[in-house]
Amino acid sequence: MSRRSSSRKSEPVRVLRTAALLLLLLAAACAAPDPSAVEPAAPVSAEPRARLDWALAIHGGAGVISKDEYEPVKEEYIASLTAALRLGAALLEEGGTSLDAVERVVTLLEDDPRFNAGKGAVFNHEGHNELDASIMSGDTRRCGAVAAVRTVKNPIVLARKVMEESKHVLLVSDGAERFAADHGVERVDLEYFRTERRWKEWMEKRAQAEAAESAPMGTEGVVALDRHGNLAAGTSTGGLTGKAAGRVGDSAVIGAGTYADDRTCAVSGTGKGEEFIRFSVAYRIAALMEHRGMSVGQAAEEVVKNVLQPGDGGVIALDRDGNVAMVFNTPGMFRGAADSRGRSEVAIWE
């Protein structure tokens, strides 16, 4: 066979090989991602990631907390916040659970007439105190809540009973009252909750025929991380001065005013409850951490500053490593934080 004929026979082979190579290059080009379509990397947290042994944050409400009005009693509020912080810190330092710390500290604040929960709660439109509270454990996401109760001394205690001794999450009004009686939760006369300060506020609001939008929101809450690595959150409130009878705000709604998940964070909110419910504020912070890779500080800032409107309120949030975020879009928020590294601080406006 001549070289010429051999060359002619091999030519189709070369053509096929060349065509196959071109097809492979074309397929590779099609498979390569378009740089403009690639999602940006998740934000990198600037917060330290070494886990603390324990950490705690508390709030006593956010709102129009006027310096002129509160400066004369500032030290009293600082003393109350400091006492609550020390109680929680001592419990956690001794190895107590985050759930116990949350319940005990919220109970202490409920008994303090300076805040709008338990004794000293505001009055509704009909001149009654109706209380809401919820609690959640981050390890199993068990939770319990009560709303519109009138005779329960410490609603946070009842909320935990609902979580641990019933198959339900939320009990309200008469049903919650009966549950309290059946489970030995302390109840008091209606007059127990009354303080002259709150009664005066209610009378002024009635005279002005306006809602309590301008009043300080004295909801109280606690988030905690214990030595076992478990998170918990709890929130308690008397609601808004002049609210409609039976109105329930975010403090009794899991995912709105309270949320805890060991995979992300624990959150307690304070502010305009309807807005916190509409935007699932507490859960949204956890979701941004889980799905967008945000730090607890970034997530809290995003929700409070960019989802809520100015004046809507604030949150305290604590991640599984002990990093704390205390963010608000109001003139002030009663708040404090402590941890196993020696941090211990309280503030109102700064």
Image (tube, rainbow, N blue to C red):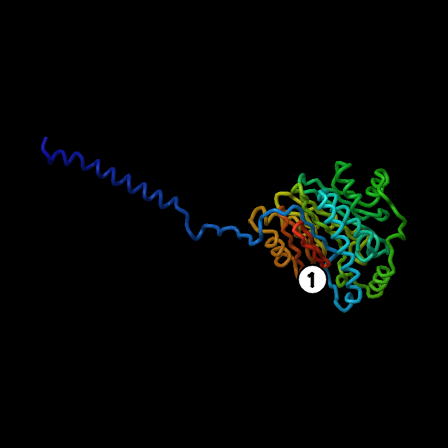
Q: Position of residue 259 (x, y in %)?
A: 68, 47
Q: Nearer the viewer, residue 59 or 126?
A: 59
* Quadrant of the snapshot with the N terminus: top left
**Count of numbered tags:** 1
Q: Nearer the viewer, residue 272 or 142?
A: 142
Q: Which residue is mark 1?
A: 330
Horizontal arrangement in the rendering, residue 131 relative to residue 280 (left or right): right
Horizontal arrangement in the rendering, residue 131 relative to residue 277 (left or right): right
Query: Going 77% across and 57% down the picture, which residue do you hit?
Result: 218
Judge whether 27 appears above or below 236 on screen. above
Q: Position of residue 228 (x, y in %)?
A: 66, 41
Horizontal arrangement in the rendering, residue 283 relative to residue 24 (left or right): right
Q: Nearer the viewer, residue 342 or 224?
A: 342
* Quadrant of the snapshot with the C terminus: bottom right
Callout 1: few (<14), some (14-19), or many (20+) C-alpha neighbours within 10 Å? some
List the single residue furthest toward the top: 1
Q: Amino acid at mark 1?
A: Thr
List the single residue furthest toward the left: 2
Q: Position of residue 254 (x, y in %)?
A: 70, 46
Quarter of the rendering containing residue 205: bottom right
From where the camera sits, is residue 190 visible?
yes
From where the camera sits, is residue 280 visible?
no
Q: Position of residue 19 (x, y in %)?
A: 27, 40
Quarter of the rendering containing residue 27: top left
Horizontal arrangement in the rendering, residue 26 relative to residue 203 (left or right): left
Instruction: Label 1, secondary structure: give it.
Output: loop
Query: Going 83% across and 62% down the picture, which residue do you hit?
Result: 201
